[in-house]
Amino acid sequence: MTKDKKPADEISEYIASFPLPVQRILKQVRRTVRAAAPKAVEVISYKMPAMRGHGMIVYCAGFKGHVGLFPPVRGDEALEKAVKPYAGPKGNLRFPYEEEIPYKLIARVVKHHVKRDAEKARQAAAKRASRR
């Protein structure tokens, strides 16, 4: 493969770069995120797997000891409370590999971000329409 030719599936290659036990977790996170954001497009952004709708919806990345999910949850008190045990210093979520990964919670977070992405798109469209 030449340097300027992209691989057929960059996300799969990203996942394959991790040890097997982590690959299994990342594959399930990928399935969970895709199911929660079915209309979004998978991309690599900032060298991490991400989902894009109207804007960037969510980033998920594998690290040495955890799966990270970005951006932080804002605007839903109940969800903020549910993710608090996993929130890092800046609010980004960290799910340690040695603990059971809360896939249902990840799905809730992604659905929340999808909703916020749609709201931002509606606001931007309304703003553009008002300029006409």
Image (cartoon, rainbow, N blue to C red):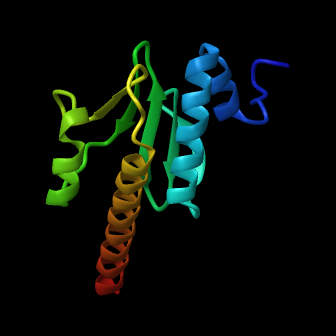
Q: Which quadrant of the view contains residue 100?
A: top left
Closest to the observer, 1 or 14: 14
Q: Residue at horizontal 38%, vertical 77%? A: 125
User: How many labels, in total?
Assistant: 0
Q: Quadrant of the N terminus?
A: top right
> What x and y, as percent, mark residue 122?
36, 76
Q: Is residue 60 above or below residue 36?
A: above
Closest to the observer, 31 or 40: 31
Q: Which quadrant of the view contains residue 3?
A: top right
Q: Residue at horizontal 64%, vertical 17%? A: 20
> What x and y, as percent, mark residue 6?
75, 30
Q: Quadrant of the C terminus?
A: bottom left
> What x and y, as percent, mark residue 86?
25, 34
Q: Of all residues shown, which one is farthest toward the front? A: 100
Indicate left or right for 86 with 99 as reference: left
Q: Residue at horizontal 36%, vertical 57%? A: 113
Q: Residue at horizontal 34%, vertical 60%? A: 112
Indicate left or right for 72 with 3 as reference: left
Q: Is residue 107 above or below residue 88?
A: below
> What x and y, as percent, mark residue 109?
35, 52
Q: Is residue 35 above or below residue 42?
A: below
